[in-house]
Image (cartoon, grey):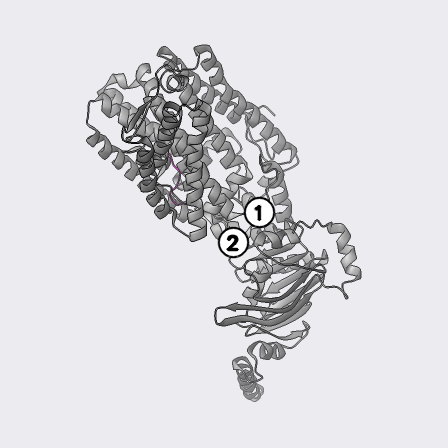
Amino acid sequence: MGMTRMTGMTMSDSETKSDSEPVLSLRGISKNFGAVSALTDVNLDVHAGEVVALVGDNGAGKSTLVKILAGVHGPSSGLIRFMGREVTLADPGAALSLGIATVFQDLALCENLDVVANIFLGRELKPAGLDEVAMEVRAWQLLDELSAKIPSVRSVVASLSGGQRQTVAIARSLLLAPKLMLLDEPTAALGVAQTAEVLDLIERVRDRGLAVIMISHNMEDVRAVADRIAVLRLGRNNGVFPPEASNAELVSAITGAENNAISRRAQRRAAETAADEPRGHAQ
Amino acid sequence: MSAPGPQAGNGDRIALDRRDQRLRQDDTLVGAIKSFVDRIKAGDLGSLPVVIGLVVICTVFTIINPLFLSPNNLVNLLFDCSTVGVISLGVVCMLMVGEIDLSVGSISGLASATLGVLWVNIGLPVPLAIIAAIGSGALIGFIYSELFSRFGMPSFVATLAGLLAVLGMQLYILGPTGSINLPYGSDLVNFGQLLVIPKPLAYALALLPGIVSLIAGLRMARRRRAANLSSAPLSSIVLRAVLLTAGLEIAVIVLNQARGVPWMFAVFVLLVVLMHYALSRTKWGRSMKAVGGNREAARRSGINVRAIYTSAFVLCGTLAAAGGVMAACRLASASQQAGTGDVNLNAIAAAVIGGTSLFGGRGSAYSALLGIIVIQSIANGLTLLDLSSSLRYMITGAVLAIAVVVDSLARRSRQSHGRA
C-alpha cells in the first residue's frame, strides 16, 4: 500500500474525468456477522468534489460500511476500487496511507493526550525526536481552517467539550490531505453554530476536490451539503436521490413503505391544520 | 527579550496559542507557578506526592538516627537502589501500556543464574555471558507478548504463570549446589560493590544536566518565538537550570565526602534519562501512551498496537534481566534466593509510588528513580533502627497502599476537573 500521491496534480486530473472514473467505487459489498447479513450487495460510487450522504434507519448498515472503508472490518465479499485501482483495506493503516480518512462517530481520540498529540497520532513529525513546534503550528493551521474555538492545543482532550472533540477529530483527518473523507454522524453532538461551521467545513473540503461520504440522521444537514443522497435499507441499496428530493420520498426509501409512521404523522398534522383554519378565519 | 515578563503578546503579533481570550496568560514566572498550583489542585500530581513522601521519610529517620543522612549510608543506599531500580524501569514500560509483568523478580533471578553458570561454571567470556543473561530476559518478554496478543491471555495471568515457570528454570540451571559465587576482584563484582566515579569527574558530570537543560530550554524558546508561539520566560529557564545544577552539585559534594557516586547508580540514571527521552520525545513513546490511554483509538490511528505491546513486554524482560545481572554483581553471587522475596513487589511498587498510573497511559521514567529511592530509604532506615524484615514488609506494604490510593484519588479528581 505504499502508493505515493501528489495532491495538486491528481486534483485537476480527477476533475476532468470525474464523470468517467469515481474516486471510490464499491461493487457487491457484503458483510456477514455470523448469521446476520449487515450488508448485502451494496454498490456505491463517489466522485472527486462530491458529497454523498449515506442515510438509513438504525441497523441499515451505514456504520458497517464506513468501518469497511476505514479498514476496521474486512468485507465478506465484494470489490473496492479506489483511485482506479482494486484495493484491499487490510487494516486502518492501509486505508489511511491510501488516502481514506475517517472521522468515527465515537471520534477515537486518546483522552490522556493533548490536542497536538491526538491530531498527529500515528503520523508524528520526526519520529526519533518529535518536532513539537512544527506539529503545534500545523495543528493551529488546521484548527484555523475549521475556525475552531479551542483555547489551547496543549490541553488534554479529556478537558474539551463534545463539539471541540469533533473539531479535533476532523482536523486530524485533514492532516494527511486525503482523497476521500468519511464522516460518521459529524453533527450529532454539535450545537447550532458548530453544526453550521462543520457543514461549511464539509463544503470547503469538497471544493478542494475531495470526495466526501457523510452519514447522518439529520435530513436538514444532509440536504444542506449533499450532492447525492444514497439510501441504505436493511443492508441493501434502496435508491439514490438528489438533494431536492422531497422528504416523503426520502423517508419512504429509508423506511421502505409509502405508508409509514412519518407519513401518517404528516397526514394527521395536515388534516388538523386544515380543520383549524376555518375556525381561525371565523374569529 | 531578556526581561522577565510576558514574552507573548508583547509586540503587534499575538502568539498563535495565546489568541483565545478565555485563556489566562501564564507566561511569567508567577503565572507558571500559578498554573502549577492549579494543576496540583485538579489532581495532576505528577511526582509531587513522592517528593513530599521522601522528605517526610528522610526527616523521620534522621531524627531517630542521624546516621541515616550520613554520606557513607547514602552511598550504600544508591548502590542498593540501582539493581531494583533498573527492574522497576521495565515495569514503568508495562504500566504505560496499561499492562503488568508480575514476574520481573523471577526474570532477574534467572538472569543472574544464567550469568553465574555461563561465566563461572562453563567459563564463557564475561560479555557473552552478560548478553546471554539479558537475552534470556528479552526472550521471556517476547513469549509473554505472544501469549498476550496471539492467545488473548491477560498479562496478569501470563506473567503469573511465568513467575513460577521462570523461577523453576532458575533453580534448574543452578543445579543442586544452589549458589554460585562470582570471583571477588573481577571487574563485574568491583562494578557492583566498589567502583565510584572519580571525584572531579563527578563534579563535572553533575554540571551536565543543568547545561543541557539551559541550552535545550533556550533553543526551544527561540524556535517557538520564531514560529510565533508563546515561549517560556528566560527567568524560568535559567531558574530551572540553576536549581537543577545546585541540587546535583550538593548531592555530589555530600556523596564525595564518603566513597563517591557509584558507577552502577550512574548507569541506572543514564537508563532512566534515555527512557524518559524515548517515552516523551519519540513516536514510540507517544504510541505507548496512546495504547495505554485508548487502545482502539491508537489502532484506528494506524499505530501497530501489537508491535507496541511486544516492545513493552520485551523491554520489560530485558531491563528485568539487566537488573538481575547488576544484582549478581552487587551480591557477588548467583543464588536460589536471587530475585525472590520482595524484589518483585519492590520493583512494581517503586514504579507506582513514583507516580506511574496503574490505569495506563500516564507516568514517567523518573517515577522508577524516585520510587526506588523511597523504598530503599525505608528499608535502609529500618535496618539502621535494627528492626526486623517483618516490620519492613508491613511498612513498605502500607506505603504502596497509600501510593495507589493517591493515584486513584488523583485520577478521580482529574476526571471531575476534566483532565483525565
Magenta residues, as a range? B354-359
As for residue B73 lying within the magenta part, the answer is no
Residue A89 in sight in this render: yes
SS under mark 2:
loop
Query: In the rendered image, which quarter contains the N terminus of chain B?
Result: top right
Q: What type of secondary structure mainly makes up the magenta span?
A: loop
Amino acid type, mark 1: Ile
Expressed as whole percent of the image width and height from the top left, the position of residue B31 reads 49, 33
Chain of the residue under label 2: A
B98 vs B33: above or below? below
Tag shown at residue A119:
1
Of mark 1 and mark 2, the one earlier in the sequence is 2
User: With A231 as the anchor, is B94 left or right in this view?
Assistant: left
Residue annotated with mark 2: A108
The residue at the point 42 percent across, 33 percent down is: B319
Residue B250 lies in quadrant? top left
B166 vs B189: above or below? below
Q: Residues within 10 Å of mark 1 (few under 14, many from 20)?
A: many
SS under mark 1:
helix
